[in-house]
Amino acid sequence: MKTNKLLSALLLGGIIASPLIADFHHTFESGASGWYSPGYWGGKLDISQDFAKEGKKSLKLSATDYKGKVYARSIVHITPKYLAGRKIKIGYFARGTGEIYSGALIYDRRSDGGQSMTFKYSEPLNLNDNWQYIEYIADFSETFAAGIAPMIELRGAGTAYVDELNIKYLLPEDLDIKSLSRHQVLREGMAIPQLKFKFSKGGEPIRFFAISENRKVLPTQSSATCDADGSVTYTGAAILPPGAVTVIAASGGCIAASEHAVLSAAEYDRLDKTASRIRLGKPFNVLFLGDSLTDFDRGFNHADKVDFWLGKYNQGKYNTRNAAVRGDFITRVEARLNWTPDKRMEFQQSVYKHLFDPKYDMIFIFLGHNDTMANSKNEYKTPLVSSDEAEASFKRVLAQIRQKSDAGIVLISSASLNHERSRKVADSMSQTTGAGYLFGVPEFLEGYNAMLQKVAAETGCTFVDVYTTMKTLPNRNELLKKEDGVHLTPAGQNFIAEQILNFLAAEKDLLQ
């Protein structure tokens, strides 16, 4: 099977991503690129070949009469992960007739869990036959926002041609920042601990934001000034409800985020009891190999949560390396392991650089989600990697690992995915792009897991079944992101971490 031809569909581990706001450049040569004018606003949107700042095409926005007001408005939805502390520039060139504005629809939280929406605009620009530049800067350097939709608005009768549109972060040239604190898991009612950040220069004014994933909880804010060497510590002592928690340190549009989790008392105590049973007799090094379920949310995913719990009772003895790669399947793992300088580099080849340094005591392999992906072009009838091909590849990979490492190898089953949600996404992709990619077909996942269990038995590896437990959970879909039904929510990351901890607690002899 020529799997490489499908790699272009495996963006972000199988889901087509929203545009990256850090460099969002629209030339409109290939269409409107996500811009649209909803029917409840005035305006008509087209692609024009009459005028172009560069290339051959531009976006054409024509004003219409809507409820007695003549105007046109178009927006594009983007999904930057963090807005608090940022500055975002929305700029473009325009010509035509009428008065045009650059701007954004800003979303904010309400304490009832809903959201408020506010339109923000630049100063107006009167259009003519010359290309003119206009921009709006959304400044969140000292405030929180839940979301942003960049916007073009034309007022009065007229037609605007828009080209070379850019949406980008405004970052200070001489300032950088990073978080120095590891992922923390907190018990409900605990205050966020002191968290350390480091700026590239000292004396900078800092704004802290403590943000709960619970949309009914408004972010808390505090201020500080970093030391002469650039060090600063968060001491806001916010107490937030169960869920994911983010602390952002920001200055001048430059931010660093520190991600943590607050668990209910019952969940925290259950995990704490399990972790307290895991005592390492020696320094213990662990390697994680996997796909986007282990690659995404680095710093606070299940590998990091295991790191927290084992570190709590084995301080200084537990070390981990996460070498997961989004979109991975077993045959691509094999190709990356077999790469030599005379071959074409595999996707993210650098992640495997010096892969077996240092010496590992245990290696977890968590795959299957892309291996079992199905394509609309063959009516979703077959998985990307056949069971026979996957079995043969796994055996070769395991043999190769054992040539380089004496570590115990743990094969983790696939997770149970939201097949119904994934089907809706796949069908929509098929209609708009001509190809849909379906994840989580139970028949394919269960066939993969049966194969994996067989391989584990035949090769002396350990098999850990997370699929069966996850499939029977009444709240399973809460463990998976609503956008795709594939990737893990913070609750899903907690679930996988707990399964790994349960395994380690039951297999204490492997840890000595």
Image: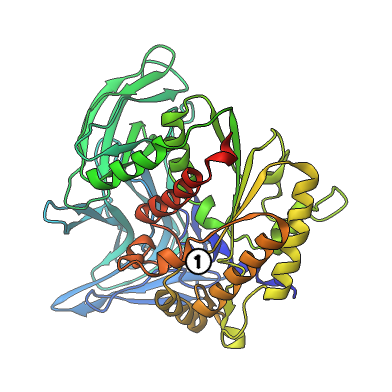
Quarter of the view holding residue 376:
bottom right
Q: In the picture shown, does residue 489 fall above or below 386?
A: above
Question: Residue 203 placed where, x, y %?
Answer: 36, 15
Q: Tell which residue pokes out farthest to the front in this image.
A: 509
Quarter of the view holding residue 125:
bottom left
Q: In the picture shown, does residue 111 fall above or below 391?
A: above
On screen, residue 53 versus residue 257, left or right, reads: right
State the scheme by which the image is colored: rainbow
Q: In the picture shown, does residue 20 fall above or below 173?
A: below
Q: Which residue is mark 1?
A: 15
On screen, residue 330 versus residue 481, left or right, reads: right
Other-residue count near label 1 (Cα within 10 Å), few / some / many at <14 / 14–19 / ≥20: many
On screen, residue 402 versus residue 277, left or right, reads: right
Question: Residue 454 placed where, x, y %?
Answer: 66, 67
Name the secondary structure under disc 1: loop
Q: Relative to the observer, which residue lies in front, 196 or 367?
A: 367
Question: Residue 441 placed where, x, y %?
Answer: 51, 77
Q: Relative to the observer, which residue lies in front, 460 or 433?
A: 460
Q: Quadrant of the N terminus?
A: bottom right
Q: Quadrant of the C terminus?
A: top right
Which residue lies at the image location 32% right of the left edge and 61% below the top edge? 151
Q: Tell which residue pokes out farthest to the right in this image.
A: 342
> The residue under label 1 is which amino acid type?
Ile
Q: Is residue 178 visible?
A: no
Q: Is residue 213 visible?
A: yes
Which residue lies at the image location 23% right of the left edge and 51% below the top edge? 214
Q: Relative to the observer, which residue lies in front, 248 or 192?
A: 192
Question: Residue 392 placed where, x, y %?
Answer: 76, 67
Which residue lies at the image location 81% right of the left edge and 56% below the top edge? 344
